Amino acid sequence: MMQALTGRYGEMLPTGERQAHEVRVDLARTVMSAYDLWKQVAEQGQLTKFVYDEAVSILNASGVPDAHVSQESAVEIISLLQEKDRSFDLAGLFASALVNVLPISVLEAKLVFHIFGYRLAQGKTIIALPESAISTFGLESVGNIFSYGDVRMIGSSQGGLAVSYNSISEAELFQGGTFLNFGKYTGRIIFGINGVFVNLSKEMSSFCYFPDGVVVDYRKKAYDCPTLQGCVFFMPNRMEKPWLPNENSLFPIIGHRAIAILNDDVFYHGTCEPVQANDAVQQRILALSGKLKQLADNYLLFERFRASPVGLTDYVNGRDWKGLEKQIFETGRQIHEAVR
């Protein structure tokens, strides 16, 4: 591999002796040459992680991390890789590696990829502008991703912040992370350990499955019947009563360890059907749910960026969103303890 690299790019400089001005001469050509070399590896059908790691290795060997690059230049290079994605659907893995390797903190662009934002690094932000179309966005990321376009699956499975302002079909948060939905949701949501999901849209009318974590749904009416398995499900504004389930109701399916807080009523898993909490337990949980709503209300301010991302990155960088996520999950844990 290194022999191929030196043959294409010339003799590699020792660590610490790279000359950034040489890379700056034509960064686009350097990146596209690295892409051609990487594609030879990617076409062998290796695992996604291996293919991504190879992209990082080749880009590092090409001197790309030392490049002086503007936001505009980065967008131009990403657009070149979008053209490659039309004929090779793994090109987005290379583009994802490039975003992590380049010395930029924010990428804001119209993005059309099969996969993009894979393993986005902490401290990095991607904003997919209107007319973006991404099949899989932000998988295994720890950075922040924002979508104003159409996304099939959004995933922030290592603990980042993900926000959708447009349409989405599926979300997966396996190892933490926060997902805010302001747009149209048409598919399923799967949460794993320590995930936080906040729905601020009226256009969520799909079947949802919440294995764990905390869900705050601001809708007044629900048109779906979510399946809850271990999570805390909180609808502070729900107006439908009576709550008791029947064959015609859209009452949540409450599995083992799940707790549903519907406005000022609390239900949890029973032997045959959901059980309403007694007065003492309900008072403890409602006190905690008030704290939960106060924490989740911090996300309402993202509404101001629905029409435009202007000022979005400054707002994101000015708050400790991971700290807020931990507070919400801790409150969910306390709610679970109140039922025991």
Image (cartoon, helix red, strand yellow):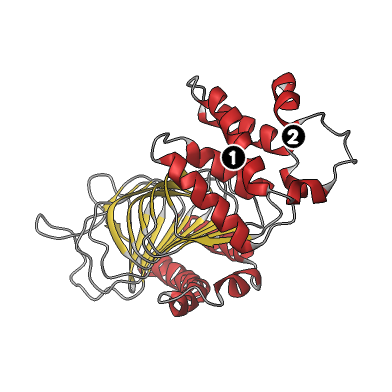
Query: Any mark on residue 32, and which?
Result: 1
Density class for disc 2 (Cα within 10 Å; few <14, some 14-19, many ≥20) is some
Residue 259, disc = none
Callout 2 amino acid: Ala
Image quadrant occupied by the N terminus: top right
Mark 2: which secondary structure? helix
Residue 160 seen: no
Q: Nearer the viewer, residue 50 or 17?
A: 17
Q: Which residue is mark 2?
A: 61
Label 1 with label 2: CB-CB less than 8 Å: no
Q: Position of residue 19 (x, y in %)?
A: 85, 45
Q: Quadrant of residue 214?
A: bottom left
Dot 1 or dot 2, earlier in sequence: 1
Q: Residue at x 56, y 39 (%)?
A: 94
Residue at 46% in and 73% down: 293
In the depicted structure, whether residue 233 falls above or below residue 6 = below
| Left or right of residue 23: residue 249 | left
**x then y, percent, for residue 194:** 52, 51
**Is 264 in front, or is 228?**
228
Q: Amino acid at mark 1?
A: Met
Q: Is residue 149 above or below residue 155?
A: below
Mark closer to the observer (1, 2):
1
